[in-house]
Amino acid sequence: MSKTTPGVEPSEEATETLLSHLIELRDRVLRMFIAVLVVFLILFPFANQLYTFLADPLMAHLPEGTSMIAIEVAAPFLIPFKLTLLLAVAISIPYLLYQLWAFIAPGLYQHEKSLAAPLVASSTILFYLGMAFAYFVVFPLIFAFFTAAAPEGVDVMTDISRYLDFVILLFIAFGIAFEMPVATILLVTLGATTTEKLAAKRPYVIVGVFLVGMVLTPPDIISQTLLALPMWLLFEVGLILARIMERRKAQEAGAEDADDPDGPDGPDDPDGGPGGDAGDGPEPGDAGPHGGDPAAAREKSSAKSSAAKKPSGTRRPDPAARAGYTPLSEAEMDAELDRIEAEAEARRDRPSGGDTEAGSTDTPDEPGSDRR
């Protein structure tokens, strides 16, 4: 929950941004509603034929002389109407997802967009495949089992409203079950788990899919098994695809490392470049070949020689031999700090050029020096 300072109103720019987002959301929702309405109006004249097509798997296994019944007064009209509306929503799912994607896509990063688009498309296709699997494979088997299991003297005459509720439940259950590859790939991609951990937990996954099948399907072993087995197979498919994605990412990372072996900062330059010993190069105020402070030069050379005489075990290894961002060890860090302190002490002990008096310029020059 965001906290705001009492008495402070949001800026005009923030208010306009919020209003623009709300207006865009309203337009997207209105387009979604219009799309569903258009599809519904196209399908409504064929509502009774659509229900007959949906009831074919059950009607094919009903005994001779029996049929489906309607026990409510308005059921012969409302049930086909309900089926047509649900079918219009199912057909409009790609357009509905597109509108939702168009609303949230501007707020996503490029890598998030590249991941979300194929996941949304594949999940929609898999949901349709789950519904088709339920209608063409599951319905004939379970309805044949149910009608054959009826006791003698019992006429199987199913109510049209309860039949519609039953098949909608199975459509949703199998549509969600077929999303198993998408869920597996998404978990691995987000780093929530790895393919090795999922493969190690395969026995628990098998038990879990049978439990899900028991909850989402009617209380019979056939529909439970027909839901659990595809879920298990789709889990294995998602595991294989996740491993392929991991290998591809590893190959891309290896190719990037091969293109830039020294990392983004480049190799260390031992002659005073980035990461090298900057103290070895000339510094402002150092003595040149023709004059300067000889005492400061001697102190600087002694500091360098003392730093060079440190044991080899504490010397910093060649940075080119360390790939990437390998951190320094404690011994390397201590050696680096000692070197920096020695250089700082040498600079503090060196007299500055401005401390010499003006009369010192009258001293005779050393032999061999050029008087300027």
Image (cartoon, helix red, strand yellow):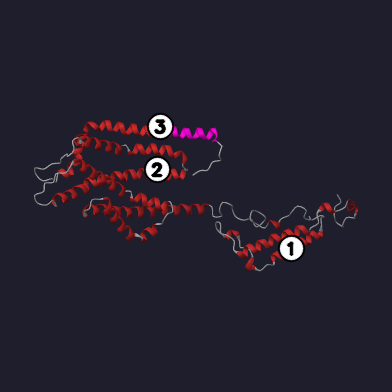
What residue is rendered at 34% in x and 38% in y?
A: 94
Q: Is residue 11 left or right of residue 123?
A: right
What residue is rendered at 67% in x and 61% in y?
A: 337
- Helix, strand or loop at disc 2? helix
What residue is rendered at 35% in x and 37% in y?
A: 96
Q: Where is residue 298 in the image (x, y as percent from the top left)?
A: 78, 62
Tag 1 residue: 303
Near-viewer residue (84 or 138) = 84
Q: Is residue 270 left or right of residue 166?
A: right
Q: Is residue 10 magenta?
A: yes
Dot 1 or dot 3: first in sequence order is 3
Question: Gap between marks 1 and 3, in whole Å?
Answer: 75 Å
Q: Where is residue 226 in the image (x, y as percent from the top left)?
A: 24, 52
| Residue extent of the magenta highlight | 9-23
- Helix, strand or loop at disc 3? helix
Q: Classify 10 Å Cα crowding around label 3: few (below 14), some (14-19), many (20 and above).
A: some
Three-letter amino acid code of the residue under disc 3: Asp
Kindly report the secondary structure that dominates the magenta region of the rendered protein.
helix
